[in-house]
Image (cartoon, rainbow, N blue to C red):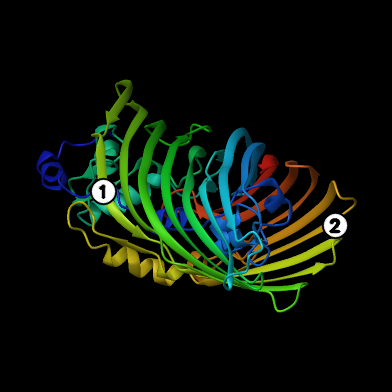
Amino acid sequence: MKKIQYLLVVMLFMSATAIGQNLVDGLRYSDYKIQGTARSAAMGNAFGALGGDFTSASINPAGLGIYRSSEFVLTPSFGKTSVDVNYLGETTNESKYNIGLPNVGYVTNFGDNGTQNGSMVGLSFGVGYNRLNNFNMKRMVEARDANSTLLDDFVANANNDVWSNYYEELAWQTDLLIFDEENGEYFNDIAEAGYGQSQRKSYSQKGNIDEFLISMAANFNHRFYLGATVGIHNVDFKESTSLFENDVNNEIPFFNDYTFNTYLNTTGTGFNVKLGAIFKPTDDLRFGVAVHTPTFYRLHDYFDNTMYSYITFDDGSENFEALSPLGDYDYDLTTPMKAVFSAAYVIGKSAIISLDYEYVDYSTIKLDDGGNSYDFFDENQEIKNAYKAVGNLHVGAEYRLSNELSLRAGYEHYPSPMNENFQSSTMDTSDAVSSAISGGLGFRQGGFFFDVAYKHAVDKNYAEVYNGSDLANFEITKDQLIMTLGFRF
């Protein structure tokens, strides 16, 4: 059933938009899971009211006002990310090891040396960076008896006069998208045979979002602290996917198999401002509040796709190959504002309990100013319908065993930003949440300190394997060992 050449239609549609930015991209660069020092990680990053740690610059910059001396910290990490996927009753697992440097920071403090000439008794400045996201992972999805195909989406687009050089054109060139001249419509052999093909899709992701910080904080009579941070974000994200569908049971006429590969590299920069305050009504009790402005990104996408097929005709079999153009696209992304409310209780010199609550409305994510003057109206409306406001929770504790040694523990909870009914009306996705437990040790000796933390995080979410497919259930487990070397002087 070799397709009939229909070149006029192809030529008319060749200029259609290639690849679109959407709600997935918006959430990827807006949903932060901060990686700072080992002490902060061990205590669930609940440092909005505590301060005295460089991670505070990314949470509540007033925390730098707690410093009484200068400090330099360096934090390497080693971890493993495992992904379990359930799709159409099949379960697969992939894993990847990661080595990183999620934190480097320097804080200098200027005190009044006890002169008490005014209410401001200390001023701190900080520079460095904290990692906000680590994208490094591998995933695999597999199914033996599929009930749809990626080609269905291509057929639907083509029959609705939507044609892309990165999708429909590749399927056309590889004899996977076929035009029925008699009925005036497109179709694919897999759907015509009633499906039943095998599917396998692999994902490989790399990259990070790092926040470079310039911070300042003031100490007023050791009771009230004000701080501000200017954050410069650097985005580097790479994703390669490969979808393989084949007629493993040899039940589909003409079609044998195809592979569809995609590549995306997103780079860019953004900036935001954080303002915060900490108040100590007593020596033991602390309250903190911080506001983070949206991060204003300018992003650049670089992408291409390839498609390969193996088709058997009446007169023999043939391999086809199609390559898309190399594409690039510039656009703006504005992330949600964030409010952080914090409290901490210091039990003498022996223990600390702290809690942070973050309010973020992900429905306010906005794409804008596309390179071709595209306004993203439809995509932004979809974001409003898909996402919601959530409250993230961070809880931490520390117990001092001696003047030199401390024990720490923490917990973090991130509700899903997705409106459950938007993603699926037939599947319960209410368990799509993220959480983390952590613990660690801290050693202090003179001006030197060494902190170590172990963090176990689980992220459960659902996503389509391709447009129109059933949802796959992804459970992403991240185990991370984090170590901070620090010097105070």
Res 378 visible: yes
User: Does residue 182 appear to the left or right of 145 in the view shown?
Assistant: left
Q: What residue type is labelled 2?
A: Tyr
- Seen at 32% across and 43% down, the residue is 301
Q: Mark 2 points at which residue?
A: 399
- Seen at 22% across and 48% down, the residue is 163
Picture coordinates of residue 32, whole percent (x, y)? 53, 56
Q: Residue furthest bottom?
A: 281
- Seen at 45% across and 68% down, the residue is 337
State the residue in front, 66 or 258. Answer: 66
Res 143 visible: no
Query: Which quadrant holds the C terminus?
Result: top right
User: Does residue 316 appear to the left or right of 391 in the view shown?
Assistant: left
State the residue in front, 178 or 347. Answer: 347
- The quarter of the picture where residue 33 lies is bottom right
Picture coordinates of residue 15, whole percent (x, y)? 15, 46
Q: Mark 1 points at which residue?
A: 330
Q: Is 181 drawn above or below residue 274 in the view shown?
A: above
Picture coordinates of residue 54, whole percent (x, y)? 60, 52
Picture coordinates of residue 2, whole percent (x, y)? 26, 32
Characterize the local packing of mark 1: few (<14), some (14-19) or many (20 or more) Cα atoms within 10 angstroms: some
